[in-house]
Amino acid sequence: QAAKAAVNYTPTKADYQKVYNRIAEIMDDAGEYDDGSYGPVLLRLAWHASGTYDKATNTGGSNYATMRFDPEALHAANAGLAVARGLMDQVKREFPWISYGDLWTLGGVAAVQEMGGPKIPWRPGRIDGYARDATPDGRLPDAAQGAGHVKEIFARMGFTDQEAVALCGAHALGRCHRDRSGYDGPWTFSPTTFTNDYYTLLFDESWVWKKWGGPKQLEDKKTRSLMMLPTDYVLTQDTHFKKHAKAYAADSALFFRDFSAAFARLLELGVPFAAAEPWEMRSLDEQK
Ligand code: CCH
């Protein structure tokens, strides 16, 4: 591989597309794991790598990929993400020239796009940092808290309420795991397809507190097979959040557009790029 052999070779878009393709293949090769895809957990890795950003001090974010180091790897919020980091290490062995931050964020892009979501503009430029760059615990949201906490956490990254609501729509994908966060279950009936179902279900179903020994979470009254975290439910309770959540429930295209913009921005928080336009990576389907 040219990119591997030549010291001064600058990887091209085609090189990154190869990495994207390998991630997409690994994502689908999940066998009995969860709902048959590693997509959701890879998306969560990209989000937790980026969501540590603090606008005031310009620290954190995806640039140095500091979740590779303890204690950040051991922060409670990151429980279970060793699965995703392990998958990414397989890709890294094949394409050793890519930085971990670029790799993990490209994983988030591949996850959203391959599961049927919008295109996420993306560009490389992150470098690997050191353990001393790791962020303090407590920068990622705590699912047990209320609307004020969610606003505060996303505002610290530099996001508006509207962007926070759009980003939370990622919970259309994946599920909570008893042995990771303590919560249990999926948010939607199609946890491996990117949809606006998270918002429609929030408003269309009756949500009641689950009676169980685990942490406080809600379940849908009808089937009792879906869940919402306290922080999800506040999107229907806080007037500002509710306005945007209603809009995304009513208009899937609006959600896709706003999610793409906010997620692309999330992945770039704190990343000093060389001047270059973001790229649109092609899905596996588009390359057939
Ligand atoms: Fe999330 N998320 N998230 N989340 N999340 C969990 C799982 C996923 C919060 C808490 C949790 C975003 C925002 C928030 C995903 C993407 C995003 C879990 C279960 C908790 C708890 C973890 C487990 O047990 O495995 C809270 C609180 C907030 C905001 O207030 C945002 C933003 C994104 C992405 C843009 C995805 C995907 C999952 C599923 C992971 C999986 O393994 O299936």
Image: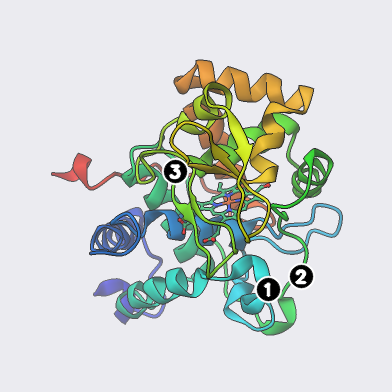
* Foreground: disc 3 or disc 1: 3
Q: Quadrant of residue 150?
A: top right
Q: CA distance from mark 2 to mark 1?
A: 6 Å
Kindly indicate whether the residue at mark 1 contacts the one at mark 3 (C-beta within 8 angstroms): no
Q: Quadrant of residue 138?
A: bottom right
Residue type at tag 3: Ser
With respect to residue 60, does 245 lie above or below?
above
Mark 1 nearby-residue class (10 Å; few <14, some 14–19, many ≥20): some
Is residue 88 among what the camera can see? Answer: yes
Kindly indicate whether the residue at mark 1 contacts the one at mark 2 (C-beta within 8 angstroms): yes
Question: Which residue position holds label 3?
Answer: 225
Q: Secondary structure at mark 1?
A: loop
With respect to residue 146, does 214 lie above or below?
below
Q: In the drawing, does residue 8 fall left or right of residue 142?
A: left
Q: CA distance from mark 3 to mark 1?
A: 28 Å
Furthest-left residue in this view: 288
Residue 260 appears at what percent x and percent y?
51, 36
Disc on the earlier residue, 3 or 2:
2
Residue type at tag 1: His
Question: Which residue position holds label 2?
Answer: 137
Disc on the earlier residue, 3 or 1:
1
Question: Which residue position holds label 1?
Answer: 75
